[in-house]
Image (cartoon, rainbow, N blue to C red):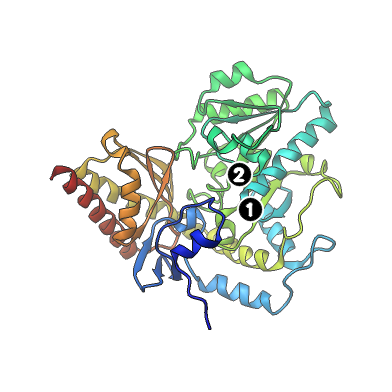
Amino acid sequence: METKVTRATFDEVMVPCFSPMQMIPVKGKGSKVWDQNGKEYIDFAGGIAVSALGHCHPIMIKALEDQAHKVWHVSNVMTNEPALKLAKKLTELTFADKVFFCNSGGEANEAAFKLARRYALDTFGDEKDEIIAFDKAFHGRTLFTVSVGGKKVYADGFGPKPMGITHLPYNDIDTLKAHISEKTCAVVLEPIQGEGGIISPTSEFIQGVRALCDQYHAVLIFDEVQTGNGRTGDFYAYQGLGVTPDILTTAKSIGGGFPIASMLTTEKFACHFKPGTHGTTFGGNPLACAVALAVVNQISKPEVLEGVKIRGQKIVQGLKAINEKYHLFKAYRGKGLLIGAVLTEDWVEKRGELFNLAGDYGVLILTAGSDVIRIAPSYVISDTEISEGLKRFEQAIAFIANKSLS
């Protein structure tokens, strides 16, 4: 007999690291999902900027089914065709010469930070070990990556932290100039801060960071876990900024929902990882790489990237139209389909209620930082789905607004 599970089952059997919504999705198609009761939701969340091609895209299904009849796992004692084809494609699309595959954004960043430290040690000696990161940044949940991240609430409470990590204000080039030194081995940043509130860099800041890294022989690492793979309308966000990093990490949408991540870099840095210095059991898994290759081949098409920009503009226009009635947003941030709507002071305390109520009305949204509603849907979301999602979102807003007036 099939086991019946409900939201209460989560509290019974799962480690309470999360507090998920009451609904449990059981089916998805395109930019819609349905829960156990058959209720339909417009997906403006995209699995937290993951589902680039929506749910159950035929291209992904075919890639998975084809590979499922070939080989599933070989480990790192040998390579496999899907991994090599995907790595080749990524080097063709980017600045990179070399690729390291793993399973999550945190693992990709762990590899990047270790590589930067190894490069600095090999090239300049063990005194050059400082990693500079930025306030409000998020780089993963391992002890190393959460320590590099800029939120103390995530990093505190686990005992001694890795040393040699400095946090500075994002978008403050003068503070970085005053601090960076010959001891700095790497500077890591998100081209758009995601969890920190969808904050874009100024041109002065991003250009200045690159120049300072060059001056002090520090590795520039771009964490494109959330911004990468077409999310901003460029295949990688750095391509729209005019600044090229030395190492780039990516995950989330590269697999369209299948767990896979990668670190991209050049031969200059890659050669400092020798056999045995770093590794992974499941990284480069044939199933994951086959699906990711299908995703990358599709989302790297110019018409898909252009569609990301057009859809993002339509959503922002819709949010502005809603705002004319309810005055809950004071600014709009982001690029492409990574959108942040900043709540006014009166609405910040209602953010949690708005998140939950939007779900009740049948639209899935996200939050970011302390005062931002985040929207990150699939790149193929239709105009009809955008309109319907905004309509349902407005219904949730209207309910809260009317309740406040009563």
* Residue 283 sits above or below residue 119 on the image: below
Instruction: Name the mark on residue 104.
Output: 1
Choose top left, top right, bottom left or bottom right for residue 242: top right
The secondary structure type at the circle numbered 1 is loop
Q: Residues within 10 Å of mark 1 (few under 14, many from 20)?
A: many
| Picture disc at residue 51 | none
Which residue is tagged 2?
140
The quadrant of the picture occupied by the C terminus is: top left
The residue located at (49%, 65%) in the rendering is 9
Dot 1 amino acid type:
Ser
Q: Is residue 259 left or right of 241 when viewed as pictured?
A: right
User: Residue 186: image x %, image y %?
Assistant: 69, 31
Tag 2 and tag 1, C-beta contact below 8 Å: yes
Residue drawn at x 56%, y 19% is 175
Residue at the spot x=73%, y=22% of the render?
A: 183
**Does residue 131 sit above or below 77 in this rendering?**
above
- Residue 52 visible in the displayed image: no
> Residue 253, image x and y in percent?
55, 56
Image vertical order of residue 73 relative to residue 322, above or below: below
- Residue type marked 2: Gly
